[in-house]
Structure formats: C-alpha cells, structure tokens
Image: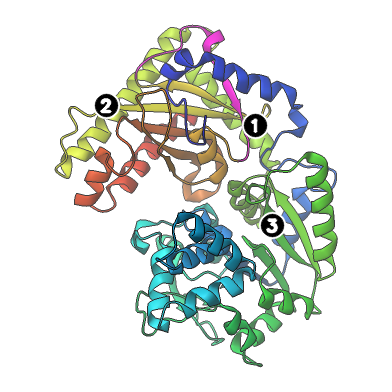
Amino acid sequence: MQRGELADLSELLSRAIGLVGSFEATAKKVPIDQRPGFLIPQLDNDPQPIIERIAGAGRLTFVIGAGASMEAGLPSWGGLVRALLESAAPASLDENDRAAWLDAAAESGLLGMAATARALATTDEEFVKRVNHDLYRGKGRDYFDPGPLAREIAAWKQAYPEIQLATFNYDQLLERALQDVGVEAEAREDNAPEPDGVAFVRHLHGFLTGDPVDDAVVLTERDYAMWPSGSWQDTFMSEALKEVCVFLGLSFTDQNLLRWIYGSTGDRHLAVLSRQSAPRLSDGVRRELESANRARLARANVTAYWADFHAEVAQLMHEARRRKGPGKPPAPYPVRAQKRALRGRRRCLPVTALPRRQGKIREILASSLSGVRAALDSVGVDANDAVLGLGLWGLDYEQREVTLWGSSDRIHVDSSTVTSVPLAWDSKWVAVEAITQGSVVEWDPDTYASRWRSVRGIPLVWTKPAHAERIMVGAVTLTTTSPSGTSIFDKAEGLASGIRRTIDIALHDELVRLWD
C-alpha cells in the first residue's frame, strides 16, 4: 500500500483487518520508549534545557527557514530548485534522456542547479516568474495558509515585541500569521530600526511580491559568489549573533548562514531540527549522525535539539513561551497532553455503554458532515448525491499511537474492534500524517481497494482562551469518492476560493470540543 492509501473510516477496519493487524504487529515490535513522540526527554536530547534557554534569554532573534513554509505545503529549498531545473530541461529529450540530463545537472549541487535554471530561463524576469510559480506549486500564494510554527512565532512577537524576526524564505506566510493575531507586519530587505507597533520580517534572501520585474531573490551560485561585503544582512546578523539566535526550520547548508554563525562570537545559540525532515535511518545510524551534527554545530556556538515531528517544533516554542511567563511554570507537556487525551477518549470510547456513546459520536459526525454539505451548497455546488465520510482520530501520548474513535457511517460496538496505529514518520495513514505535520494534508491514493479516492486530514489542536494552552489531540479525516482535482471540494474551491479552509476550520472548531 502506498503512502496516502488510508483506512480513515471504520469501514476499512472491517475490510482491511489484516492490514491493521500488520500495523499493530509493527507497533508491538518497537518498545514504547523507542517510538517517536512529542517532547519526550531522552538522554542526549532533552527538550527542557532548550525550553529554559529560550524562555530565559534576554534578547532573541528567530531565524526561520524553509521548514516553516513546508508546514504550509510549500516545497523545501532543494525541492524548489529541483522543480526549477525540471522546468528548464530541454524539451527535445525523451523521458529517459531527460532524467539522465537532470541527474547530471544535479551533480553541480543546489546552487549550480539554480544557476543552470536561471541561465536557461532567457531573462531574469522569466526566471523570477518561474520561481514564483514553482514556490506556490502553480496555485498562487493565497492558496496557502501559515502553518503552526509561523503562527507560534507570531504569538511570540505579539507577546514580546522586542524579539527580532529574520527569514530565508521568499514567501510572506509569517507576515500573514502576524496579521492574523492583530500585529501590523512588514516584509523588509534592510536593517532599518523597527518602529513601535510594527513587526519587521527581514527577508535575508529577498521575497516575492508577484512582480517579476522588481522581485529578486538570492538563489544561484552567482548570487552567493557576488555577495557584497558589508551588506545589510551581514550587519543585521552580526548584531543578532551577539545575543541569542534561535534557528527554526533550517538545514544548515546555506553558505551565508554558515559564514555568519562561524564568524560570530556571541552566546550559545539554539537550533531546533526535525527528524521528520531527515531520511529514514536505523536507530544506531541516526543516533550517531545526530551526535556528529551536534558536535559540528557546537563548533559554531549552536546547540541542537531534534524534534521527532514537524508539529513538535511549534509545540516546543509554545512551551518556551509559556515558561517565559507570566504565571506558574506549566507541568511537562507529555503529562498535560495525556491528561487531555484521556478526557477525550473517555468521552468517545467509554468503558461502559460503548454502543450508546458511539451512537452519539456518530450523530455528531453525521451532523458535522451535514454542515459540510450545506457549505458546499452555499457556493452553488449540489452535494446531495456526493458520497462523503468523516472520521475522528484520537492521540494517546503514553502509547504514542493514534486511534479511530468514531466515524460518520458506523460505530464501535465492542472495544476489541478499536484498533490503533503508531505515530511514525512518513506514515501511510493520513490522520497520523496530519498530526505529525501539524497542518492539513490531502492525499489521492493511486491504487486502493476502497471507494474513498481523496482523503483530507485536519489536525485537531485543543487550546484554552487566548491560546494560553495548546495541545495536539488528534485529527479528523474528510473523505470523498472522487479523486483530488476533480472532487466536489475542488469544484467548490473553483467557485469560491477559500471554501476548503472554511470547512477545515469549522470541522476543527466543532470536533475539538470533544476534548473539553
């Protein structure tokens, strides 16, 4: 079964019990203390010192990389460069020769690949136009919403205006996240003083406005080779590195970043990295590689912490913000999260009277699905004949598993039918992927023995008023029998841009209340 080929509703639990059993067997082979988790202390990778360090720093600069944009569905730096090179590949080559050409061109490295793509684009304006197209995957910048990390950074800036924000990203998702919390934001390419009441987001390598004539970005080998001495970026980073910098969503391969950090003489800085971004490795290889990278970054005054999941990075930053105050320091996140998780499970999967409670959960999900149909109808799409499904998934922090708690078309009548799948990187289950990514995920299975052809996973994050608490509690999956691109949701989006996001938010806000 390929990635994205999901069993999101309980129908699949009955039709694919053998598959579920194989997942359970896999989970049982791995001791719980070795499974991925959220902010789980480990001997050489304890999140608490990182949380304390960020919370206790006097002056902070957050330096943000592509990881924050990838949460929103944008490509990595490498993915963007590869897409640019593919669009520049000679049309005269057949499929095999084209692949060979791309592989050979890739031997020059990312900067060389970008330089080749720019050279073959004829003009700088055409190249910038292609960068804009490939960055937003041809969908336009309004299609994408800020991810959890961008929103948590915005919450930091709202609470502590004195922090500085710098990014290597060309998009303006961070500015949008700031505006969403009521902070006036400006994308800047200078080192001008930040006025009161305005959040400057300094784009160290430029940003895109959609104007190919005026836009310029640092991307190719020439851009780095011709870097001017004494640039505003050099001055800004030199000053920032005298205090404490927190690097988020970066891979530490950018030549300018390396030059800045190795040339600094300031305090020990912090880097939060994600194992979910790295290739799958055996535990021994991963441990040794992380140890080597930790030693490497320590030579540049950077302390590294590896989060298991992309969503964990935002949670760590939330924990640091809570630790900074005001008020009493919170209990460790896994303790608080498991307490909240059990509250939801008791509500959906009680020990006694399970069928009756499941009937109520199904009613809630069916009612929510009726709301989805009404939203589609409101924009001129007839949803009466559409086959849709809704599944509710809960997260168990102690077992580090995700469980289908309920669905819109059937119920659990026996606790023995309740099955769980492990938290995992690159999971085949869209609910797991939505939870670990911390953002909406949509998959269209190519080969799957089920009527469900498109599955949309929406993470559920429980919060208190004013976002004083934030806990990832589960996910909801919305399924349809039509593939992505031709589904009823795509038709609705074509008529009313943003309707999918409206539906996502409505489902989230309705169903996350089950954890209250």
Residue 18 is one of the magenta-drawn residues: no
- 86 to 38, vertically: above or below: below
- Pick whichever of labels 3 and 1 is earlier in the sequence: 3
- Residue that carries the numbered disc 1 in the rendered image: 397
Res 513 seen here? yes
Magenta stretch: give its range.
Answer: 409-425
- 102 to 22, vertically: above or below: below
The amino acid at mark 2 is Val
Residue 271, x across and y down, in percent: 71, 61
Residues 129 and 269: in front is 129
Mark 1 crowdedness (10 Å alpha carbons): few <14, some 14-19, many ≥20? many
The Cα atoms of the two marked residues, 2 and 1, are separated by 33 Å
Task: State whether the magenta stretch is mostly helix, strand or loop.
Answer: loop
Residue shown at the point (65%, 30%) measured from the top left: 400
The Cα atoms of the two marked residues, 3 and 1, are separated by 21 Å
Q: Which mark is residue 78?
A: none
Residue 167, x across and y down, in percent: 56, 71
- Residue that carries the numbered disc 3 in the rendered image: 272
Residue 210, x across and y down, in percent: 35, 74
The scheme the figure's colours follow is: rainbow
Q: Are marks 2 and 1 in contact (CB under 8 Å)?
A: no
